[in-house]
């Protein structure tokens, strides 16, 4: 079936504002929707998500960036599985935002198969081709070509999880042979990327509490293939203040480089240490 020529422009108009807002609050990431007939960028530094999913030379080149960065910044050689974990995080974190930010801001959920996304990691620049998106009844974009109306918020949450799984699933398969982790652990990583990416961006947007509430509804802990819940909980600071935190479903393995410097959401980080860090820098996550 041939798609109408106006379809990419129509879907772009439904999502462009979300990506513009993302870049406004987080200039380190830029997402551009390709126009009809526009080729995905290539050349040094660019990689297609489908190339990462294939797990070949392109993935080797992608991970060489992490290997060089670790040696430069930490003066040591990391294990290959640690390098692969770092590389997966640095792709999956922004890739999840391509789906979760339009959902959070406008209740629109794009479908982005791996063939339609490219990434330039040094620039934090992604391009994507959006052929369809889900939205709610009453959305002004519901009449656009490519729009697919779903019944309610619960159905839209299911679209978010399906869209992320449809994109990340092949990427996880590409990375898996290089990581000493099973399928469940990899989907735990995917759960963390969904939660921590949107949580951070929502903090920049001034909507952290709403994001926490919506992420808890999105990931109640019973939706396969994802592992674990959003994992949020509250600690009490030294002055009685509330300090939001969460428990990751997976480990980023940074401790293998700096055992004394775990992430604040790492299961290895005790509550006393979390309180110390969060109370010292209230905006930290």
Image (cartoon, helix red, strand yellow):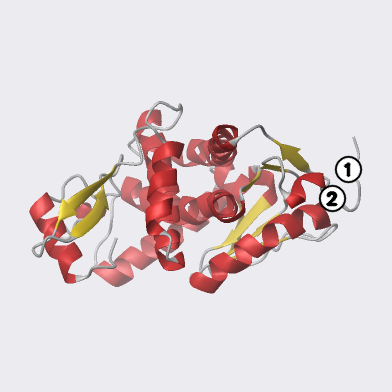
Compared with residue 269, is residue 204 higher up or lower down, i.e. above or below? below
Q: Quadrant for residue 105, please give it.
A: bottom right
Residue 129 visible in the displayed image? yes
Q: Residue at image x 32%, y 49%?
A: 82
Q: Residues within 10 Å of mark 2 (few under 14, many from 20)?
A: some
Q: Which residue is mark 2?
A: 7
Q: Which residue is mark 1?
A: 3
In the rendered image, residue 144, in percent from the top left (x then y), is placed at 82, 48
Which quarter of the figure is the N terminus placed in?
top right
Q: Residue furthest front?
A: 138
Compared with residue 180, is residue 237 higher up or lower down, i.e. above or below? below
Q: Nearer the viewer, residue 204 or 171?
A: 204
Q: Quadrant for residue 56, please give it.
A: top right
Q: Residue at image x 37%, y 32%?
A: 227
Q: Quadrant for residue 39, please give it.
A: bottom right
The answer to whether mark 2 and mark 1 are in CB contact below 8 A is yes
Q: Residues within 10 Å of mark 1 (few under 14, many from 20)?
A: few
């Amino acid at each position: 079936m041939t798609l109408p020529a106006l379809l990419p422009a129509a879907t772009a108009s439904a999502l462009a504002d979300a990506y513009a807002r993302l870049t406004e609050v987080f200039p380190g990431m830029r997402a551009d929707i390709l126009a009809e007939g526009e080729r995905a960028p290539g050349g040094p530094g660019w990689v297609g998500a489908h190339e990462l999913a294939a797990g070949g030379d392109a993935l080797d080149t992608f991970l060489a960036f992490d290997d060089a960065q670790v040696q430069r910044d930490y003066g040591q050689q990391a294990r290959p599985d640690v390098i692969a974990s770092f590389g997966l995080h640095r792709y999956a974190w922004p890739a999840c935002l391509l789906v979760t930010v339009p959902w959070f801001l406008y209740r629109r959920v794009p479908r982005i198969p791996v063939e339609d996304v490219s990434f330039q990691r040094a620039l934090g620049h992604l391009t994507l081709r959006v052929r369809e998106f889900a939205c709610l009844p009453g959305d002004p974009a519901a009449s656009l070509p490519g729009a697919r109306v779903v019944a309610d918020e619960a159905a839209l949450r299911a679209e978010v999880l399906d869209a992320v799984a449809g994109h990340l699933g092949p990427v996880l398969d590409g990375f898996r042979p290089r990581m000493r982790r099973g399928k469940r652990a990899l989907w735990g990583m995917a759960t963390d990327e969904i939660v921590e990416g949107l949580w951070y961006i929502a903090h920049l947007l001034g909507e952290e509490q709403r994001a926490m509430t919506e992420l808890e509804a999105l990931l109640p802990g019973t939706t396969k293939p994802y592992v674990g819940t959003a994992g949020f909980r509250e600690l009490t600071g030294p002055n009685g203040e509330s300090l939001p935190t969460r428990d990751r479903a997976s480990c980023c393995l940074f401790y293998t480089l700096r055992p004394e410097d775990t992430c604040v959401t790492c299961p290895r980080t005790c509550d006393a240490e979390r309180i110390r860090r969060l109370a010292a820098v209230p905006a930290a996550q």
